[in-house]
């Protein structure tokens, strides 16, 4: 079964990781290296055992673009962070796991990623990805 594991962050988290004063805990170069090493090791292990399909970190919310239908069904484009949401999707893993329990074990490991004291952790959201029914062409 396929599962998507998703983690969230805010613009303040991205700012703190880039050294900007955001009111959030600042990340040092050593903190960033420890996080990237942990994530790299986890991804390598998941790939080696055949569970990893894809996984990516996403750009900061300030680089987001939201496209909706406006008045008269005319597309409306808004740059920047999502207006009503503090936390947004910041990264994901698409995995092929034997069970929801295995996906949960991996999510629990993700929460052990090293972060600076006070930076906060999680949550990791797990969603199953059901097989799509065949399309008749």
Image: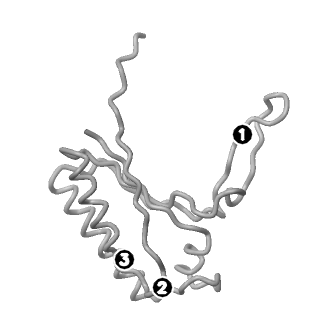
Q: Residue furthest top?
A: 137
Assign a secondary structure to mark 1.
strand
Q: Is residue 13 left or right of residue 128?
A: right
**Label 2 vs 1, first from the N-terminus:** 1
Pointer 2 residue: 118
* Secondary structure at numbered mark 2: loop
Q: Earlier in the sequence, mark 3 or mark 1?
A: 3
Q: Position of residue 92 (x, y in %)?
A: 41, 55
Residue farthest toward the front in the current orientation of the protein? 101
Q: Residues within 10 Å of mark 2 (few under 14, many from 20)?
A: few
In the picture, the disc for residue 76 is: none
Q: Which mark is residue 35?
A: 3
Determine the residue located farthest toward the left in the rendered image: 49
Q: Give percent across and percent down for residue 73.
A: 79, 29
| Quarter location, residue 87 | bottom right
Location of mark 1 (residue)? 68
Please, is residue 21 above or below residue 71 in the view? below
Q: Position of residue 131 (x, y in %)?
A: 32, 29
**Residue 100 drawn at (x, y percent):** 25, 47
């Amino acid at each position: 079964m396929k599962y998507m594991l998703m983690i969230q962050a805010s613009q303040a988290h991205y700012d703190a990781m880039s050294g900007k004063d955001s009111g959030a805990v600042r990340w040092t170069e050593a903190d960033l290296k420890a996080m990237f090493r942990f994530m790299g090791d986890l991804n390598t292990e998941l790939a080696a055992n055949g569970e990893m399909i894809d996984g990516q970190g996403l750009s900061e919310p300030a680089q987001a673009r939201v496209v909706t239908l406006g008045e008269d069904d005319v597309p409306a484009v808004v740059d920047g962070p999502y207006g009503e949401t503090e936390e947004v999707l910041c990264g994901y893993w698409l995995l092929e796991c034997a069970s929801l329990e295995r996906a949960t074990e991996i999510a629990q490991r993700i929460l052990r990623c090293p972060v600076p004291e006070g930076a906060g952790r999680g949550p990791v959201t797990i969603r199953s990805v059901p097989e799509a029914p065949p399309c008749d062409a």
